Every structure is written in C-alpha cells, then in structure tokens.
Image (tube, rainbow, N blue to C red):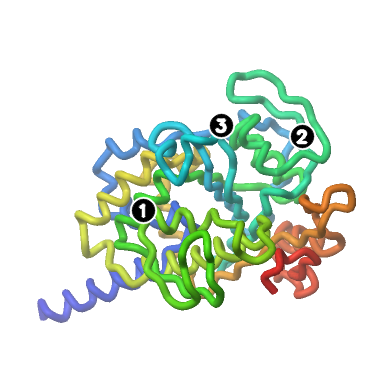
C-alpha cells in the first residue's frame, strides 16, 4: 500500500514539474516556490514594480476571458554581477536584450511566445523614469533603448501602445540570473544546423554551460545575416531546449537543487507587484499546470527592413496588426500573421 502511495506521489511530482510553464524565469521560481514558500528570505530578493502606478490609467482593457499576457524581459545590465559576464565591463548602461510577449489563452492548455526584435523602430509613449522625471514621447526610437532610458514599466507601456494588448504581468531576469540558472540545472543541450564561428560551435549537438549559453543567446555576428533577427531564432531555440531540460529534471524531488535555483534566480528577478512573492509566483505557476512546454509556439513579431535605415526594422502590416488582434481577442493566430518579410537570413 505504501509503495502504491509513493508511486502516485512520484507521478504527481513529475507531472507538476513537466507541465508548469511561465516562460523562462517564472517556471523555475514557481516550481521551487511550491516546495519552499516557507523560506521568506527569498521574497526579499524579488524586486516589484507597480505597473498601474507607474503607467497610470491609460492602458488597454484586460482580456474579457481568463487568458493572460506576460512580458518577459532579459536585461543586459552591466552593473553588479553582470559586469563580469561576456565583456560586460566594456559596455556602459543597461538594455533590454530580450523581449517576449507570452500569451496564455483561455483554458491555459497552451502558450505562444512572440519575440520583439530589439532593433525595431517604435513610438515611445511619454513615460516616468526611474528617478521620477518625465520622458517625453518620441517616434522612431529603437525598442531596446526604452529600457535603458526609462526602465521596465516604460517597456510595458510601449508594448501596450504598439499592440493594444494589456500586459497582465512583467518578469525581468538579468544576465547573472540567467547564467546561474543554466549552471544550476547542469547545462542545456542544443542542436544547430550551421557553424557559429564566434562561439567555436560546429553544426551538431552541444551541451552549453551558463557562460556558453549566455553567449549563444546573445550572438548575432557570424550567424544568419548578423542582425538581431537571426539571434531571435537562436533565443527561441534555446528557450525550448531550456524548458525541455527542466522538464526532465525532478526539481520537486531534489530540494537542495530547487532551493539553490530559487535563491540564485530571485536575486536577479524583477516582477510586477502581482508576482513579487514566492507564494504569488507559485500560485500563478500552478494555474499553468495544463501547459506542456513542448506545445509552446514561438513567433517573431512580423517586421520589415526600414526604408530609411536598412539596419533597423519596423512592424510589417497587416501581419503585425493581425497578430496583435488575435492576442487581444484571445483567438487563434492566423497563419498570415506569422510571416515576417525580414527574416535575418535564417530561412
């Protein structure tokens, strides 16, 4: 009888670990938090942003369904532990190196991740900066410059303005946390179909440690056409590989590893005020139990090369409009909305 109960518990632990998907950072924190919510000191590691206070009332309406939208940012900060990563000390300031809009439709049995190229020219709305000053609206600014000038809340506001899609939650992980995450799970295996010379990676299968993974998701030169669009393909490939690796590991059955991951990652985590505790992250993670990482669809915002500056891109219409409309209405994304005129030379 006892053996039967233990088998059921083991299956339940594996099923929970397999199904939780909240993008990159929330997934791990939710799993760890489920078993370690009593460690209140971890709550103090998480920095919270009150989006309603920072942005104000000028926001899109919430979805009329139970669907949710999550903005995940990978920050290219050069402060603290990040300064020693991949030549970080040579570059000043902070940038949003990766931006993903993750849409979880009603029913929460699947998810789609939409990457916004950092070189996209956008209209930045008026924002309040970190020090409380007002940053005026500006047209034709690079998307990743918004973070460096005004912080994550302004990135949320910019995404909401360009898409009409309300972001229910924000999750930001800096490079130091990303590296520690990969090392904590023992590395991530990726398979590439062409050499990436700057990384000394030949076509084939490789297991990457934290430092190598960081370089992998940041590389742009020597892959595709050397643009940010080519890098997005690598980032999306790595995200799926990372989720697959976590899926294989029984984190709930390894308390020491789960706590180590939660401790290191929360030190580099910023969320909106609705997710800024382990219990809130765990609750949100459990609500995603029906999602299997292998079913997540990864897309890039349809873009085309800018006619004035071929090194920059702009949202391609009507494709981008159809994509955002599908997310606003919690509908299936039409195939016509998934095709990007600019591909980065990867397809």
Residue identified by numbered label 3: 93
Residue 122 to residue 305: above or below: above
Number of dots carrying numbers? 3
Q: Residue at 82% across / 53% down in the picture?
A: 310
The C terminus - image quarter: bottom right
Judged by depth in the image, the label closer to the viewer, 2 or 1, is: 1
Location of residue 118 in the rendering, given as x and y in whole percent from the top left corner: 67, 49
On the picture, is 54 further left or further right than 279? right
Residue identified by numbered label 1: 181
Residue 30 to residue 244: above or below: above
Location of residue 41 in the rendering, given as x and y in whole percent from the top left corner: 27, 36
- Would you identify the image quadrant in which residue 7 lies? bottom left
Residue 125 badge: 2
Residue 227 to residue 289: above or below: above
- Would you identify the image quadrant in which residue 42 lies? top left
Looking at marks 1 and 3 on the same chain, the residue that comes earlier in the sequence is marked by 3
Q: Residue at 37% across / 55% down in the picture?
A: 210
Q: Residues within 10 Å of mark 1 (few under 14, many from 20)?
A: many
Q: At numbered mark 1, what does the secondary structure look like: helix, strand or loop?
A: helix
């Amino acid at each position: 009888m006892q053996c039967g109960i233990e088998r059921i518990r083991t299956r339940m632990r594996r099923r929970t670990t397999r199904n939780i998907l909240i993008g990159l950072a929330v997934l791990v924190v939710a799993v760890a938090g489920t078993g370690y919510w009593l460690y209140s000191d971890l709550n103090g590691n998480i920095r919270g942003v009150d989006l309603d206070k920072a942005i104000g009332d000028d926001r899109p309406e919430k979805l009329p369904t139970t669907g949710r939208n999550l903005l995940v940012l990978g920050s290219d900060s050069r402060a603290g532990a990040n300064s020693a990563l991949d030549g970080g000390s040579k570059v000043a300031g902070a940038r949003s190196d990766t931006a993903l809009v993750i849409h979880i439709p009603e029913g929460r049995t699947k998810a789609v991740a939409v990457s916004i190229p950092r070189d996209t020219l956008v209209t930045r709305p008026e924002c309040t900066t970190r020090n409380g000053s007002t940053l005026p609206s500006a047209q034709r600014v690079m998307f990743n410059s918004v973070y460096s000038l005004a912080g994550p809340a302004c990135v949320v506001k910019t995404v909401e303005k360009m898409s009409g899609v309300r972001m229910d939650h924000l999750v930001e992980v800096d490079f130091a946390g990303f590296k520690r995450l990969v090392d904590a799970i023992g590395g991530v295996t990726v398979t590439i179909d062409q050499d990436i010379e700057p990384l000394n990676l030949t076509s084939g299968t490789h297991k990457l440690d934290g430092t190598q993974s960081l370089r992998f998701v940041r590389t742009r030169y020597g892959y595709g056409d050397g643009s940010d669009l080519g890098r997005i393909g690598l980032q999306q490939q790595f995200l799926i590989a990372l989720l697959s690796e976590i899926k294989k590991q029984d984190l709930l059955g390894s308390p020491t590893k789960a706590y180590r991951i939660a401790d290191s990652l929360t030190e580099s985590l910023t969320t909106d005020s609705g997710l800024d505790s382990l219990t809130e992250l765990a609750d949100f993670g459990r609500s995603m139990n029906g999602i299997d990482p292998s079913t997540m669809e990864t897309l890039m915002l349809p873009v085309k090369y800018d006619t004035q500056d071929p090194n920059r891109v702009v949202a391609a219409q009507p494709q981008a409009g159809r994509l955002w409309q599908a997310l606003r209405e919690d509908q299936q994304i039409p195939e016509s909305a998934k095709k990007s005129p600019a591909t980065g030379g990867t397809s």
